[in-house]
Image (spheres, rainbow, N blue to C red):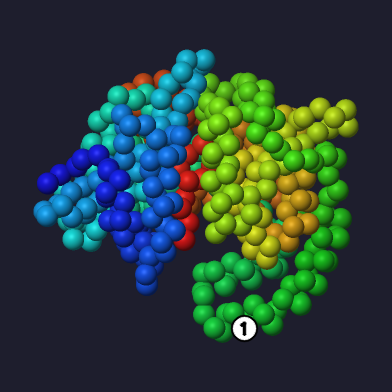
Amino acid sequence: MGVRPLTEADIPQVVDLYWNYMRRRKGPIPQTLFSLFHELLFVNPFTDSELPSLVYEGQGGKVGGFVGRNVRNMSFRGRSIRAVLGGSLVVHPEFRSGLAVPRLVERFMATDHDLTVVDSANNISKNVLERMGYSVIPALNIHWRRPLRPSHYALYGLSVTADSTPVKLLRLAAKPFCSLADRVAARLPASPFRHITPRLHGGELDIQTLLQCMLEFRKGYSLWPEYTADSLHWLLGFMESRTARGALRKVMLRDESQKVVGWYIYYVKPGAVGEVVQVGGDQKLTKDILDHLFWDALHHGVIGLHGLVDSRRTPDFSDKGCFFTCRGGWVMAHSGDPEMMKLLERGDAFFTRLDGEWCLDPGD
C-alpha cells in the first residue's frame, strides 16, 4: 500500500477517478476516454519512463489517487534543463483524510529535476502544494479577458454562472437587444469595443514557421520551452482533436514588407468565449497583433476572449480594452535553484498555455 508508478493496467481505475471525482460526471464513462488516457500517459512525447505518472494504491490493489506527470525540455540562460509538469491530482473521497495526497506530492517532488511547474491547480491543490513548498508565480497568473460583443458577453457570463431555465429564456429573449447594443458599441469612436481593421496580414501558421517564431521572438527571456517538429506536431494534433473548447485556429502575421512579426493560437467557439493559447511576436507590435486577433475572432463568431498574458505585455493588453484577474488555474513552481525562482517571479520566462498541462486537458 502506498505510491507507485502508473502502469497501463491502472488506466481503467484512473479514468474512473477522473470521470467521477474530478469532472463529477454522471452516467457511463465514454469508451474513447480510456484510449485517450493511454495516449496521454504512455504515447505522449512529453512522457518519460524515468519520471512516470503516479498512483496511490490502497488495500486490495484499489487505486485511490493519481497525479499526472510530463517532462518538458527547456533552456535556462542557454543551458538545457528538464522541467517536470504536474497534471491532474485526483484522490478518491475514501482516501482524502489519509496519507494519499501528501505522499503523492512528496513522491512527485522527490525526483531529479531542475524545475517543477503546475499550471492548472485549483484552490484545493494550491493549498496542498503551498504546504509542500511550492510558490504561486504572480507573473504567470495574470488572466486577461476581452469582451468582443460586450452585451452578448455579459449575457453569456450570466447564463454560465446561473444555468437555469429562466436564465436560458432570458438569454434567448435578450439576444436581439444585445445585437443592437453591440452594433452601437462597435461604431462609437471612443468605444473600447470599436472594431478596428488590422494593419497586419494573417496566414496559416505551420509548424516550421511556429518553431522559427519561437526561436526568434524568445530573445530577452532567460527561460523558455524547447520543441522539435515532432513534439509540436503531436501537441497541436492532440489539441485539435479535443473539441470541447472549440476549433483550434493558428494564425501567422506579416507586416507590409511580408516579414513575419507575430502569431497567435486560440480556440474558436462561435457564440461563446474563445480560449487563447498563445500570443507572440515583436513586442513593439503587440497592439497590432491584438487588433488582428480580435478582428479574426469577431469574424468567426466569438463573443469574447480569455487567456494568460505575459507580464511584459500587460500595458498593451490594457490599452486594448482587456481587464485582468488572478482567478483561474494557478501556476505554481518549485526549484532548488533560487535564481530560477527569482526569474520566474519577475516574469523572465516565456511560458504560455501551450507549454504546460493546460493544453493536455482530456476534456469531456
Q: Is residue 329 above or below residue 53?
A: below
Q: Residue at coordinates 12% horizontally, 46% vertically from top-left? A: 1
- Using the image as rendered, state which of residue 120 and residue 251 is in the foreground: 251
Q: Residue at coordinates 54% horizontally, 40% vertically from top-left? A: 235
Q: Residue at coordinates 19% horizontally, 42% vertically from top-left? A: 3
- Residue 279 falls in image quadrant: top right
Horizontal placement of 303 versus 339: left or right? Answer: right
Q: Residue at coordinates 72% horizontally, 33% vertically from top-left? A: 262
Q: Amino acid at mark 1?
A: Leu
Q: Give residue 337's position: percent from left, percent from top.
A: 36, 21
Residue underneath mark 1: 169
Q: Give residue 198's position: percent from left, percent from top.
A: 83, 44
- Using the image as rendered, state which of residue 219 and residue 63 is in the foreground: 63
Q: Is residue 158 above or below residue 205?
A: below
Q: Is there any visible trace of residue 310 in the rendered image?
A: yes
Q: Is residue 142 above or below residue 334?
A: below
SS for dot 1: helix
- Using the image as rendered, state which of residue 141 and residue 84 is in the foreground: 84
- Using the image as rendered, state which of residue 189 and residue 131 is in the foreground: 131
| Structural crowding at the residue carrying mark 1, measured as other residues with C-alpha within 10 Å and reported as few (<14), some (14–19) or many (≥20) | few
Q: Give residue 82's position: percent from left, percent from top.
A: 41, 25
Q: Is there any visible trace of residue 130 in the rendered image?
A: no
Horizontal placement of 68 versus 97: left or right? Answer: right
Q: Give residue 305's position: percent from left, percent from top.
A: 65, 54
How many marks overall? 1
